[in-house]
Amino acid sequence: MRQSLEVLAVPELARRYAEGMDSWRDPEARRALDAWIQQHGVNVIPWLRGLVRANRATIEELLS
């Protein structure tokens, strides 16, 4: 996922994803990421849903 976001997404989204993966046990880091998601989710979440929709068959194949 991280590598895909680095290729397909804006750098900030890939960076935030990487931060979340690297520091998910740190409560302070999670709060900062949660705040960013609250601020930007209205734009980011629909884009991610569209990415999943466009690649659904590939994702299902990878998960089977």
Image: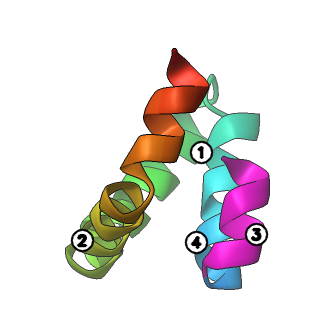
**Label 4 or label 1, whichever comes before in sequence order:** 4
**Label 2 or label 4, whichever comes before in sequence order:** 4
Instruction: Say whether residue 61 is magenta.
Output: no
58, 36: nearer the viewer: 58
Mark count:
4
Q: CA distance from mark 1 to mark 3?
A: 21 Å
Look at label 1 and name its amino acid.
Ala
Location of mark 4 (residue): 13
Are the residues at dot 1 and dot 3 in contact (C-beta closer than 8 Å)?
no
Which residue shows up at 62% across the image and 54% down it? 17
Location of mark 1 (residue): 29
Q: CA distance from mark 4 to mark 1?
A: 15 Å
Mark 4, secondary structure of its residue: helix
Look at label 2 and name its amino acid.
Pro
- Which residues make up the magenta segment? 1-9
- 51 to the left or right of 26: left
Q: CA distance from mark 3 to mark 2?
A: 18 Å
Look at label 4 and name its amino acid.
Leu
Which residue shows up at 71% across the image and 81% down it? 11
Location of mark 3 (residue): 6
Query: Residue 60's spot in the image, x, y percent?
Result: 44, 31
Location of mark 2 (residue): 46
How crowded is the residue under tag 4: few (<14 C-alpha within 10 Å), some, or many (20+)? some
Please tell me whether the stretch drawn in magenta is mainly helix, strand or loop. helix
Mark 2, secondary structure of its residue: helix
Q: Which mark is residue 9?
A: none
